[in-house]
């Protein structure tokens, strides 16, 4: 797709649709492209960290830095693939996989006690002490049948979240 | 033009009325130039002392749309170029109040001017856009409390543009007003709804900020806009960390509550 011109061809839309496993409709992809071009101020073909942070809801999200690492510099095709996890049509597995990647900050395929603790720090800020966070985490892990020293894999996440009735959905507005 | 350069003190009553009619006519022409199709709902505003009007803000044309029905005096940012010329001639005649965002002491000066204006019985009713900046007509941002602590009745006006015809949002960072007008004029039509809503007074025990929020609710519901908790100046800067902290606080409190409930259950079972 090269540099971001403001026009998408039918081929482009189909290519993007294939890449996200047809989770988004063609109309949704056109809407997303309009938004992408709005955010990508100087038509570089990707959205920089600063430009993401210009969306107030994103900047206010306590996990914004973690999400930024995952989306910074993505071109439109990969950006849509990333967003597809948030669609109502995405599978539970895909959603849980994204959550796993948020927790796995060192990207080594396993989530340790400290990894979860770091996410908890982002989520609770100065409103919980380190001891309280460790206490909560130990208790939660214990109840789920794990210990402090356990390393959680994607399958463990699937087991824990699979039955929780997780809802992580965003609607793409179509004009 | 001579009509507009006479100050209020020298004008007899009939001339004042004529001036108001002329301003309404000029605005009518302006609206017709971009094929404005405007539906007004609700009772037309009446000129009474101690009444201010507030409306949500999308573009400078909001003012013109409202002005063609009833002449208001409005609080506006001084603009350069031909807009500034119009401001100095036509709009000065209706008693508009100017402010300058970049001046430090400006807020106090404007507050004083507002107070003086509403005391005067002959002045045109004051129209204030409490959002303080243009917003995209999907949301309303936090209202500034200035209009709500004047001890006056506040009459809300809701404005909603029909997006099918034109996106009327004027992003002053991206477009000059001239380009914005050209865009409006070359589109099919500007279709919009204006609702004049029931005048509101400060309730006993209500702070001006709560009053502002209540009026924002009324306007947002009527025009079908979402309310967001940040102020209009995010166009110019990043959100303050206190919004993130608020979210962290909500999360932390809910986790601590769960922890307490778990430990209470544990104690009960022992």
Image (cartoon, coloured by chain):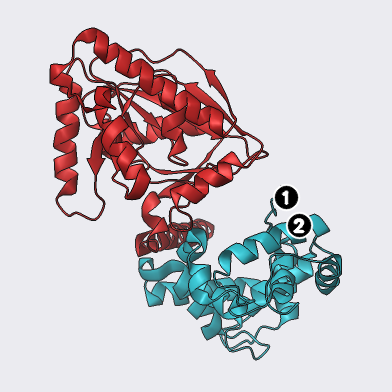
Chain colours: A cyan, B red
**Which residue is at the front of the view, B265 or A137?**
A137
Cβ–Cβ below 8 Å for labels 1 and 2? yes
Observer able to see residue B105: yes
Q: Around disc 2, counting alpha carbons within 10 Å, would you say few (fewer than 14), some (14 to 19), or many (20 or more)?
A: some
Residue at 79% of width from left, 55% of height from top? A27
Residue at the far front: name it: B2
**Left or right: where A142 falls relative to A19:** left
Observer able to see residue A138: no
Which numbered disc flags the more N-terminal residue, 1 or 2?
A: 2
Q: Position of residue B6 (x, y in %)?
A: 19, 24
- Which quarter of the rendered picture does the N terminus of chain A lie within? bottom right
Task: Point out which mark residue A174 bears.
Answer: 1
Kindly state the secondary structure of the residue where label 2 is placed. Answer: helix
Task: Point out which mark residue B22 bears.
Answer: none
In the image, residue A107 sits, relative to residue A144, either above or below, namely below
- In which chain is the residue bearing label 2? A
**Left or right: where B193 falls relative to A18:** left
Residue at the far bottom: name it: A108
Where is residue A38, by image quadrant?
Answer: bottom right
Kindly state the secondary structure of the residue where label 1 is placed. Answer: loop
Residue beneath disc 2: A28
Where is residue A142, by image quadrant?
Answer: bottom right
Q: Position of residue A17 (x, y in %)?
A: 83, 68
């Amino acid at each position: 797709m090269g540099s971001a011109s403001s026009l998408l061809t039918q081929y482009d839309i189909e290519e993007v649709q294939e890449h996200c496993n047809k989770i988004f409709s063609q109309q949704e992809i056109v809407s997303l492209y309009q938004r992408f071009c709005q955010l990508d101020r100087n038509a570089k073909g990707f959205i920089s960290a600063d430009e993401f942070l210009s969306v107030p809801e994103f900047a206010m999200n306590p996990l914004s830095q973690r999400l930024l690492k995952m989306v910074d510099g993505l071109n439109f095709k990969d950006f849509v693939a990333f967003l597809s996890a948030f669609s109502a049509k995405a599978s539970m597995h895909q959603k849980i996989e994204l959550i796993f990647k948020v927790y796995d900050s060192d990207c080594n395929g396993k989530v340790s006690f400290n990894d979860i603790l770091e996410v908890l720090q982002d989520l609770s800020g100065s409103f919980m002490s380190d001891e309280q966070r460790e206490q909560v985490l130990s208790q939660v892990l214990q109840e789920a049948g794990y210990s402090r020293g356990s390393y959680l894999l994607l399958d463990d996440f699937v087991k824990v979240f699979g039955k929780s009735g997780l809802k992580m959905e965003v609607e793409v507005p179509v004009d | 033009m001579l009509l507009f350069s006479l100050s209020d003190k020298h004008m007899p009553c009939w001339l004042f009325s004529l001036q108001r009619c002329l301003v309404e006519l000029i605005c009518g022409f302006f609206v017709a130039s971009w094929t404005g199709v405007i539906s007004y709902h609700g009772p037309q505003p009446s000129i009474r002392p101690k009444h201010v009007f507030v409306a949500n803000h999308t573009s400078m044309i909001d003012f013109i749309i409202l002005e063609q029905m009833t002449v208001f005096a409005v609080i506006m940012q001084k603009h350069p170029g031909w807009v500034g010329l119009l401001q100095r001639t036509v709009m000065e005649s209706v008693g508009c109040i100017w402010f300058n965002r970049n001046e430090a002491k400006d807020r106090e000066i404007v507050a004083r001017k507002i107070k003086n204006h509403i005391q005067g019985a002959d002045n045109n009713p004051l129209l204030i856009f409490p959002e303080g900046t243009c917003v995209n007509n999907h949301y309303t941002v936090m209202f500034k409390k200035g209009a709500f602590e004047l001890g006056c009745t506040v009459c809300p006006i809701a404005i909603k543009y029909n997006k099918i015809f034109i996106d009327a949002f004027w992003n002053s960072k991206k477009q000059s007003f001239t380009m914005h007008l050209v865009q409006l004029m070359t589109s099919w039509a500007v279709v919009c709804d204006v609702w004049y809503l029931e005048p509101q007074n400060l309730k006993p025990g209500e702070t001006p900020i709560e009053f502002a929020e209540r009026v924002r609710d009324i306007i947002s519901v009527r025009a079908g806009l979402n309310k967001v908790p940040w102020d209009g100046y995010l166009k110019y800067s990043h959100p303050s960390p206190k919004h993130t902290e608020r979210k962290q606080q909500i999360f932390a409190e809910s986790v601590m509550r769960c922890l307490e409930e778990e430990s209470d259950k544990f104690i009960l079972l022992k």
